[in-house]
Image: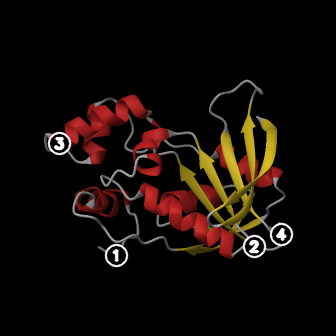
Amino acid sequence: MQRQAEAPIPSRYGPFKMMVYAEKSTECMPHIAFVAEGFDPTQPVAVRIHSECMTGDVFGSRRCDCGEQLDTSLRIAAERQGVVIYLRQEGRGIGLINKLKAYNLQDLGLNTAEANTHLGFDVDARQYDCAIFMLQDLGIQQIELITNNPTKVEAMRRSPIKVVGTIPLIIPPQPESKQYLQTKQDLMGHLLGL
C-alpha cells in the first residue's frame, strides 16, 4: 500500500488535506487520511481511526452512532490540528451486504454480536495494519486516540505508534441506537457510560 494522491479539501469543519492510500492507483475504494491544517507530526496528534459505515456516515442511519462519531471526530481534528483515518472496512469488517443481513437478524431479536457470528463472522473482524502504515507515512509517532473502544487502543499500543492518551467520543444514544450501544458496552467493552 502507498499514498496514491492528495488534495486540499475545504470542509465545514475547516481546511483539511485528503490523502488516499491503496495498492494501485486504480483502486476505487482507497483508505483515507483526512489531515487538518496545522498538523504537526512532531507532537502528539489527535487521531480518529474510523471504520466506514455507509448507513451512518452517508445516509444518517440512527441504528448506530457512527455518523455522529465521524462528525464529532472531524470537528475535534480541525480544532486540534489532528487526523481522521477512514478505513474501508464496513460493518466491523463484514461488508455492506452482510451488514444489512445482520440488521435483518437484529430486527428478529439478535444483538449485533450475535448477528455477526450467526452469519459466520467474528464479532469484530476489523484490522488496523493499514491505519498504522498511514500514521507512519505521515510521520506520526505519538497519538491521542479519539475512541471509546479499548480493543482499538490495545491494537495501537501493540504497534510502533505510542498512545499517550485517549479522547472520549460519547454520543448520546437515540431510541433506535440504544440497544446497539448497550451491546457495544456490555459485550465489547466500549466505554460509553450507559
- What's the distance in space between the residues labelled 2 and 4, CA to CA? 8 Å
Give the percent coordinates (x, y) of residue 52.
51, 45
Mark 4 or 1: in front is: 4
Of the numbered discs 3 and 4, the one sitting upstream in the chain is: 4
Q: Residues within 10 Å of mark 4 (few under 14, many from 20)?
A: some
Earlier residue among tags 1 and 3: 3
Tag 3 near tag 2, CB within 8 Å = no
Dot 2: element? loop
* Closer mark to the observer between disc 3 and disc 2: 3
Q: Earlier in the sequence, mark 1 or mark 2?
A: 2
Q: Please, which residue is most extreme toward the left here?
A: 108
Check disc 4 and give the amino acid type.
Answer: Asp
Number of dots carrying numbers: 4
Q: Secondary structure at mark 4?
A: loop
Looking at the rendered image, the disc whose residue lies closer to the viewer, 2 or 4, is: 4
Q: Which residue lies under the disc numbered 4?
A: 40
Q: Please, which colouring scheme is shown?
A: secondary structure
Mark 3 highlights which residue?
107
The span from disc 3 to disc 4 (Cα, nearest Å) is 45 Å
The answer to whether 10 appears left or right of 180 in the picture is right
Q: Which image quadrant: the N terminus? A: top right
* Residue 145 point in image, percent of width and height: 61, 67
Q: Residue 182 placed where, x, y %?
A: 27, 62
Rendered-image quadrant of the C terminus: bottom left
Q: Secondary structure at mark 1?
A: loop
At horizontal 59% and vertical 45% (from top left) the residue drawn is: 87
Q: Amino acid at mark 2?
A: Pro
